[in-house]
Image: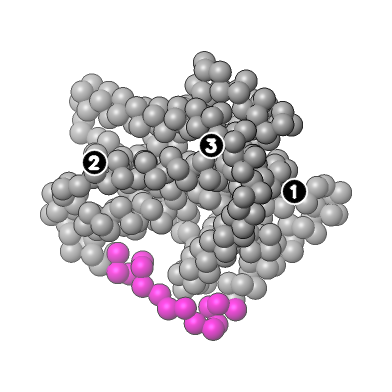
């Protein structure tokens, strides 16, 4: 639990939200399409299809099914940290949290190879636009950074302070500590927006590495129960599988439909629906910034490495609140 509470502000502090709009370019619009596709898919699954009935009746009928559905919606806009934050805030049972992760990982193992196959052989957009030198310089400038004792101690102190303040405020106003992660997210965003960029930029590489490490540590402990979640898996596998099939299928179909509409009916060329950008944005939404960067690097899309990192971190910033709001609306 401590690793998760520290990882949340660390991952957010690794983002550069102030320059996000300027430096992401058309990929920001692509990411908005991908996030909208996830949200629309979840709405359709719970309103037009019997997913809500199946999920409500699963996991003992105590409401855990809908909590996990809301957390999965958040995860497929932001990342794993948002999934856990929503589960924590909605007080889902540990077995339900672990079972939801297991089922989602199965579908992710199907999704990512499909995206990689669609991306294979596609050229870098910067090569098409003949501005590769500028892209290479920006990529090196953003991705460079050393982890030092000073940066490590500073970023851990900031994360600890944000976590402490969030818990103190909740205790002061006599609120449940289950809301600590959303409050930490909000406080981290305020720090990002108000603190001088010169102070935060040297710390961001360290924040990303340490935050990701702590998040993976939490995931490892979440899967530690092993066979103890077997009964939960049996009970929720079919309802969650149905929900995730709809989510992933409609996510891809919505992006294809958006690309078709804009390509065929827009008079102006819209760079946000270029296949490379839509695939990268979809990967950032479904898997987070790490998978989006991996997709861009593996295909030589140097112009999308930095923007994919930024939009993925933007997903971290907003997905928790979307997930909580989604559950409040559909529960």
> How many marks overall?
3
Q: Report helix, strand or loop for mark 1.
A: helix
Query: Which quadrant of the rendered structure holds the N terminus?
Result: bottom right
Task: Report the magenta residues as a range.
Answer: 139-153
The span from disc 3 to disc 1 (Cα, nearest Å) is: 19 Å
- As rendered, which of 259 and 73 lies closer to the eye? 73
Which of the marked residues, 2 or 3, is nearer the chain's N terminus? Answer: 3
| Horizontal side, residue 170 vs residue 298: left or right | right
Q: Is residue 106 visible?
A: yes
Query: Helix, strand or loop at disc 2?
Result: helix
> Which of marks 2 and 1 precedes in the sequence?
2
User: What's the distance in space between the residues labelled 2 and 3, CA to CA?
Assistant: 24 Å
- Residue 192 pos. (x, y %): 55, 59
Check the image and name the residue furthest to the top.
48
Task: State the residue at coordinates (35%, 45%).
Answer: 112
Is residue 144 in the magenta section? yes
Residue under label 1: 178
**Residue 58 found in image quarter:** top right
- The outermost residue toward the bottom is 149
Find numbered disc 3 in the image and state the secondary structure of the residue it sits on. Answer: helix
Residue denoted by label 3: 73
Disc 2 marks which residue?
118
Q: Quadrant of residue 273?
A: top left
Which residue is at the front of the view, 168 or 242? 242
Say which quadrant the C terminus sits in.
top right
Up-down relation of residue 316 to residue 148 (above or below): above
Based on the picture, tell me whether residue 214 belongs to the magenta stretch: no
Residue 164 vs residue 187, the one in the foreground: 164
Mark 1 vs 2: CB contact within 8 A? no
Tell me the residue at 72%/31% (across/down): 60
Residue depicted at 20% across the width and 47% down the height: 120
């Amino acid at each position: 639990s401590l690793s998760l509470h520290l990882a949340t502000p660390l991952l957010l502090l690794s983002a550069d939200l102030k320059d996000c709009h300027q430096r992401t370019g058309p990929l920001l619009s692509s990411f908005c399409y991908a996030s909208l596709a996830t949200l629309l898919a979840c709405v359709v699954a719970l309103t037009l299809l019997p997913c809500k009935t199946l999920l409500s009746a699963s996991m003992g009928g105590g409401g855990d099914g809908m909590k996990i559905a809301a957390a999965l919606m958040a995860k497929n806009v932001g990342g794993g940290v948002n999934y856990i934050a929503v589960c924590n805030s909605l007080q889902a049972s540990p077995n339900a949290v672990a079972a939801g992760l297991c089922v989602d990982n199965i579908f992710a193992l199907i999704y990512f190879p499909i995206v990689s196959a669609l991306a294979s052989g596609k050229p870098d957009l910067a090569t098409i636009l003949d501005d590769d030198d500028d892209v290479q310089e920006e990529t090196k400038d953003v991705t460079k950074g050393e982890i030092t004792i000073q940066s490590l101690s500073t970023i851990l102190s900031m994360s600890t302070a944000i976590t402490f303040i969030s818990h103190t405020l909740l205790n002061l106003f006599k609120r449940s500590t289950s809301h600590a992660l959303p409050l930490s997210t909000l406080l981290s965003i305020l720090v990002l927006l108000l603190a001088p960029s010169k102070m935060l930029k040297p710390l961001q590489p360290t924040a990303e590495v340490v935050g990701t490490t702590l998040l993976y540590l939490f995931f490892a402990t979440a899967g530690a129960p092993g066979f103890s979640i077997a009964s939960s898996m049996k009970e929720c596998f079919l309802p969650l599988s149905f929900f995730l099939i709809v989510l992933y299928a409609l996510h891809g179909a919505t992006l294809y439909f958006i690309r078709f509409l804009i390509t065929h009916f827009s008079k102006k060329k819209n760079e946000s629906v270029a296949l490379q950008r839509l695939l990268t944005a979809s990967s950032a939404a479904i898997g987070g910034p790490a998978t989006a960067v991996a997709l861009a690097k593996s295909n030589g899309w140097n112009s999308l490495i930095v923007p994919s990192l930024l939009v993925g971190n933007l997903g971290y910033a907003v997905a928790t609140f979307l997930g909580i709001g989604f559950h409040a609306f559909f529960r």
